[in-house]
Image: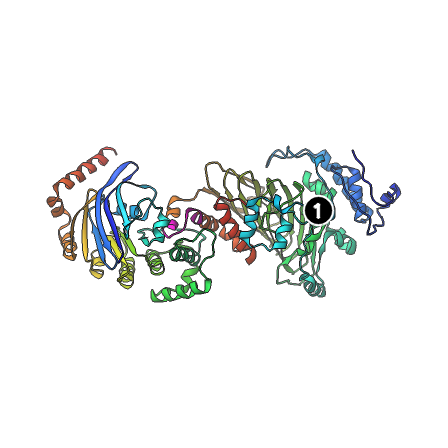
């Protein structure tokens, strides 16, 4: 195993022990492939983290190595964990040549009207994204209201108390193998705190994070919405996004306190080499509302089941999820709703589409604990299979420990109806346009909840997918 | 003046011959009625003209203005000016009327448009849509509804007529073979045809409805029997059929009548 040579003198073990290391500007760190304690210590030292975080990471690493891969969901046994970079500064990344970007990806960018600079970033041609500093003044407004909105690394440094109070409490490292992985090597992500009674009207977006290291490989997001507050967070990109590294494992922890309202919207379209394994969970307290709006496109395998734990009476949860699996893609997505208190309600609407041999599945849990009386949970999962090569599965898990509840589960599988196709074609639409329109109509309940730009992009992307040229 | 010419058209469905040589010519500005007993092939003709993939053309030609459209797909025929108003328009969930119409109108006006190219400007489209909806007495809310989703019979017909108004086809075929249609729907169709038909549109109404033909007097009435058009007359032929039924037609065309009864026996025995 090769060792790293930092440009400055190698720090001694003593420095690591206390977790404080003086990073200077010209300290260049070039990571190596593979994962072990040394890498984790280096990551923590790079970030100048307190001892407790280093301890947390190391413990999580042990858990990660101790756990086997889950044998349900996608096939993860192909992943060679030692053949991956777990941490790399953006400046170290190899930049691709624009000529290497596949034609169909370029065509998608054109179709979606992606600006030049963004195209280069998304395609991996440029490692850094020079975004405008539009959000600067936005930050000021938010700060005035006491809102904290920064990246997770900064939050650990600048707001240690509130950070430590919640970090790792919603998703403990031992939750699953990939939560453990993230807990060991996390870097970047968003941290949001909304004070009591504050309502942020416009959606918070994470542009400022685009320059952060790791391009979202092991993001760790922590969001706390205090009592009676409300906000909406939007992240992700409909455009196909290239990644140098094929393993992505993010963790998102959210707390919505009494009377609070929060929506987390994401659309992801990772390139076909990516394993996208995400653990997302929110705790919703008394009379609060938590919503996940989740769009999954692309990737080689996505495993993602946004969860809402309804902790106190009056809490409500809603998840809208789309998965579109094209050739070579496997989306294993869904939702978990866990009723821990009486008088709580939840709803899941899942739409999955498979095309060209893709496989798209719904995997969901509706759980009601004993004592959680008078709960309602409603799951609607619809699958659209576009051709005989493609596949769709539904794995509903229903665990009910209480009699006084209302559980509804409706599932449907369909293909594009010939009569619908003919109707639209008889009005001048080509077969691809007609199919695209039908598919767009299929996911409309979800698309209408997206911010306008996302909705427009999503529809354009569907059109492109239906024309047979993959994005 | 454009002409829709159907020459010796033969059509099979699931390898069963239904149309056995239909000849028909419709000019822009004319209203034709097509009648005939159940099973004579009226709806088959409508769907074959529109280009439904299940209706296989095994012989003959369809021409619009002398250019052969027999091999063209449904959408290509639509762009050339063919339109079929469906008996039971299908529901397309999640697709707004306005979005659908904008797409259809764009393609009709720009028949060479490639997939992915720009649609007609929203502002122009909205203006036109509003005008037509107002003329047809439709609430603008209608445009935001999902296509045919939860529409009443009358609303579905209005939607078909609205499409006709905006697409301005050269040849409109109205499939109104269902005798059980509610009176509101009939009214919508007949008023729509009155309003929209003119020197630039040729109309073929396929129907039993006395009322419909009263309000939209056809210049030509055709009668089908066993997959062929056996007689053509004017509006008085339609009136005769309404009083006497098809008995006299069958008498006048014994060959086709025999074919009809043997077909019926066949389908009964295969039950």
- The x and y percentages for residue B231 are 15, 49
Residue B216 is left or right of residue A322, and the answer is left
- The x and y percentages for residue A348 are 54, 48
Depth check, front residue: A112 or A199: A112
Span shown in magenta = A423-434
- The x and y percentages for residue A436 are 46, 48
Residue B214 on the magenta segment: no
> Can residue A35 be seen at all in this image of the molecule?
yes
Residue A29 is left or right of residue A113, and the answer is right
Q: Is residue B226 above or below residue A71?
A: below
Q: Residue at the location (51% across, 52% down)?
A: A460
> Can residue A364 be seen at all in this image of the molecule?
no
Depth check, front residue: B35 or A444: B35
Residue A433 on the magenta segment: yes
Give residue B269's quadrant in the image. top left
Q: Badge 1 is on which residue?
A: A214
Helix, strand or loop at mark 1 = helix
Depth check, front residue: A318 or B61: B61
- The x and y percentages for residue A355 are 50, 41
């Amino acid at each position: 195993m090769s060792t790293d040579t930092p440009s400055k003198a190698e720090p001694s073990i003593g420095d690591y022990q206390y977790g404080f290391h003086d990073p200077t500007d010209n300290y260049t760190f070039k990571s190596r492939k593979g994962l072990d304690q040394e890498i984790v210590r280096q990551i923590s030292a790079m970030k100048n983290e307190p001892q407790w975080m280093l301890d947390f990471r190391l413990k999580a690493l042990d858990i990660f190595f101790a756990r086997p891969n889950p044998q349900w969901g996608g096939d993860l046994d192909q992943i060679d964990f030692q053949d991956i970079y777990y941490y790399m500064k953006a400046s170290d990344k190899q930049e691709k040549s624009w000529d290497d970007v596949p034609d169909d990806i370029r065509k998608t960018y054109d179709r979606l009207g992606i600006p030049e600079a963004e195209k280069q970033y998304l395609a991996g041609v440029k490692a850094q994204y020079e975004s405008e500093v539009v959000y600067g003044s936005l930050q000021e407004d938010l700060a005035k209201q006491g809102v904290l909105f920064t990246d997770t690394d900064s939050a650990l440094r600048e707001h240690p108390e509130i950070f430590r109070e919640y970090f790792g409490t919603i998703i403990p490292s031992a939750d699953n193998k990939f939560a453990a992985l993230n807990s060991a090597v996390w870097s970047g992500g968003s941290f949001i705190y909304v004070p009591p009674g504050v309502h942020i009207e416009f959606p918070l977006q994470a542009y400022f994070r685009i320059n952060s290291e790791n391009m979202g490989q092991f993001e760790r997001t922590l969001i706390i919405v205090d009592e009676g507050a409300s906000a909406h967070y939007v992240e992700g990109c409909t455009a196909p996004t290239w990644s140098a590294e094929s393993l992505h494992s993010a963790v998102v922890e959210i707390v919505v306190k009494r009377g609070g309202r929060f929506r987390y919207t994401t659309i992801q379209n990772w390139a076909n080499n990516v394993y996208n394994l995400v653990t997302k969970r929110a705790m919703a307290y008394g009379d609060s509302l938590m919503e996940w709006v989740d769009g999954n496109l692309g990737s080689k395998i996505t495993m993602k089941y946004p969860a809402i734990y309804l902790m106190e009476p009056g809490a409500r949860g809603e998840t809208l999820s789309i998965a579109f699996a094209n050739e070579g893609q496997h989306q294993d997505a869904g939702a978990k709703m866990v009723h821990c208190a009486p008088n709580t309600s939840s709803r899941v609407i899942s739409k999955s589409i498979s095309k060209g041999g893709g496989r798209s599945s719904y995997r969901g849990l509706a759980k009601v604990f004993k004592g959680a009386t008078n709960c309602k949970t409603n799951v609607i999962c619809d699958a659209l299979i576009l051709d005989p090569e493609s596949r769709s599965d539904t794995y509903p898990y229903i665990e009910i420990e209480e009699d006084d509840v209302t559980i509804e589960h409706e599932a449907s599988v369909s293909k594009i109806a010939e009569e619908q196709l003919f109707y639209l074609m008889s009005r001048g639409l080509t077969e691809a346009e007609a199919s695209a329109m039908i598919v767009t109509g299929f996911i409309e309940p979800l698309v209408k909840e997206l911010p306008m730009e996302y909705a427009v992009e999503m529809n354009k992307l569907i059109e492109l997918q239906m024309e047979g040229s993959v994005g | 003046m454009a002409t829709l010419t159907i020459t010796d058209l033969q059509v099979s469905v699931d390898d069963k011959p239904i149309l056995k040589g239909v000849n028909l010519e419709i000019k822009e500005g004319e209203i034709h009625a097509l009648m005939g007993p159940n099973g004579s092939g009226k709806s088959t003709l409508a769907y074959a003209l529109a280009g439904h993939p299940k209706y296989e053309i095994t012989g003959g030609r369809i021409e619009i203005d002398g250019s052969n459209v027999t091999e063209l797909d449904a959408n290509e025929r639509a762009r050339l000016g063919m339109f079929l108003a469906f008996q039971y328009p299908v529901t397309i969930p999640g697709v707004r009327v306005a979005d659908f119409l904008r797409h259809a109108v764009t393609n009709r006006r720009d028949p060479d448009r490639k997939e992915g190219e720009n649609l007609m400007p929203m502002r122009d489209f909205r203006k036109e849509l509003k005008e037509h909806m107002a003329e047809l007495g439709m609430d603008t809310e209608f445009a935001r509804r999902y296509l045919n989703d939860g529409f009443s019979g009358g609303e579905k017909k209005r939607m078909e007529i609205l499409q006709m108004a905006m697409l301005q086809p050269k040849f409109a075929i109205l499939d109104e073979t269902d005798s059980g249609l509610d009176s509101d729907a009939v009214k919508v169709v007949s008023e729509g045809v009155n309003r929209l038909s003119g020197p630039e549109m040729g109309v073929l109404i396929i129907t039993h409805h006395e009322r419909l033909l009263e309000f939209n007097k056809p210049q030509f009435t055709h009668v089908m029997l066993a997959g062929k058009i056996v007689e053509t007359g004017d509006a008085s032929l339609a009136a005769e059929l309404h009083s006497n039924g098809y008995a006299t037609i069958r008498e006048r065309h014994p060959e086709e009548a025999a074919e009809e009864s043997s077909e019926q026996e066949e389908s009964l025995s295969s039950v």
